[in-house]
Amino acid sequence: MKPVRSIAIIGYGHVGRAFVSFFQLKGVEEIVLVVRKTITGALDNIDESVKVIWNLEELKGVDLVLVCVRDEAVAEVISLLPDHIPIAYTSGSIQLDELSKTHQLGVFYPLQSFAGISQKDVAEIPILIEARNEEMMNLLSDFASQYFRRVEAISSTQRAKLHVAAVMVNNFTNHLFSLAHDWAETNKLDFSLLLPLIQETVRKINHHSPESVQTGPAIRGDKEVVQRHLAQLEGRTKELYKLFSESIAERYSSKN
Amino acid sequence: MKPVRSIAIIGYGHVGRAFVSFFQLKGVEEIVLVVRKTITGALDNIDESVKVIWNLEELKGVDLVLVCVRDEAVAEVISLLPDHIPIAYTSGSIQLDELSKTHQLGVFYPLQSFAGISQKDVAEIPILIEARNEEMMNLLSDFASQYFRRVEAISSTQRAKLHVAAVMVNNFTNHLFSLAHDWAETNKLDFSLLLPLIQETVRKINHHSPESVQTGPAIRGDKEVVQRHLAQLEGRTKELYKLFSESIAERYSSKN
């Protein structure tokens, strides 16, 4: 296949939006953005160089299509595309085997959560690729390596397992921050006091295993503090506090 | 009281160790380190300028004592100190009211988790202070402001509430990282692939509320992916995955 000079991006959610801005900035020669008919406004941040179309049938003559739609829509979108164009989808969850075998199909999975992402961080996203044949693998690998720092081939099975870990470290971590944010607001505490602690929590695991830097009342076996905290909490926050404390206490007591 | 030129640090756990190195580096004129008799080795990173003693009774003539021992030992250590020396303890959990009223007592609470902390980040730690009288408050405020970027007065009640939030955003977040690390190891995945995602998770909340950047299967109401993930997990990780997914789904469905 020829090197990728023109791409189409289907979908204008968090991923599609970030990719359009990023590839625009990186000077990809031709970008076609395909959006649903219902999206007419909200196409901000788009240069005139990006061609916007509202109909999949109008799509032709690009070197690679990146499908950035919701998981439920991926199979259908692919089925509507011509089968001679190389296509890659960006979902962490969908197995390559589940999809059309008549298309030139591959996976272009950015391991990142795109809501609120900063433009300059897009190139740092690990891109995990997969394809059914060498030709498609080379195309994806060459294209991804041009723009992203870390590109790795990974099977559907491994990608699905990585997605579980991604949900834990991003979605759940962020939800903990939301619950702490609520707690701070309820108690008239300035949430920003916690930011250096949060930053340090993450900085440490660049150099240490998370296990080796665990601290707090649960690992110390300080049941009094744990009980005092639980007594102040309620609802899901209380359930999570309890479950975390048990999980931490068990993990480290069995190592002593 | 006179300005603080000499300090004693009692205890050589994570906090005591970080403070000795930090104040040494900052050129505090005189530092006395008080450690238990059982600690003889492991006194690394200590300049000759630091005087080490193994007996509380030998302690005299410093301008401020920082008590950096475990919560259970704080009251006892204070009771053994002469009552004319200003003393501050570093615990997030202990109320000032619970302790000796005959001493010049205050709180010097560093809102940080010290295991594995980098030396250059110590000055970024918010220091939350409390004292029974204005004189002691001024002493702590002047001393802390000399070395730390953010110093705030906060009551025992508010400090205890902040400690709950600190446990959530540090101890629990780090435990999530440990569980994800286990999961990656079990499945022969490179944990470092997750680091850009983790860093971005934290970077975002410097500029956005955590709630506004929540993503993932639970907030999308994607029960199929949640079930597929749960089917692969077991033990505490599975329980936590389930509870988080419920908590996230409830929170956002009630807002739609």
Image: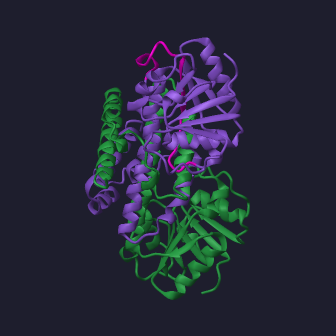
Chain colours: A green, B purple
Rendered view: A74 above or below A214: below
Which quarter of the figure is the C terminus of chain B placed in?
A: top left
Q: Which residues are magenta?
A: B95-117
Residue B116 sits above or below residue A105 on the image: above
- As for residue B3 lying within the magenta part, the answer is no
Q: Is residue A133 left or right of residue A248?
A: right
Tally of numbered tags: 0
Q: Is residue B97 visible?
A: yes
Place of residue B43 in the rendered image (x, y in percent of width and height, measured from the top left)? 54, 48
Residue at the (49%, 40%) spot, across then down: B211
Q: What percent of the width, then of the height, locates residue A196?
A: 58, 41
Residue B160 relative to residue B116: left or right: left
Q: Quadrant of residue B180?
A: bottom left
Q: Position of residue A143 (x, y in %)?
A: 62, 76
Query: Percent from the top left, x then y, of residue B53?
Result: 54, 37
Does the magenta stretch mainly form a helix, a strand or a loop? loop
Front residue of B201 and B167: B167
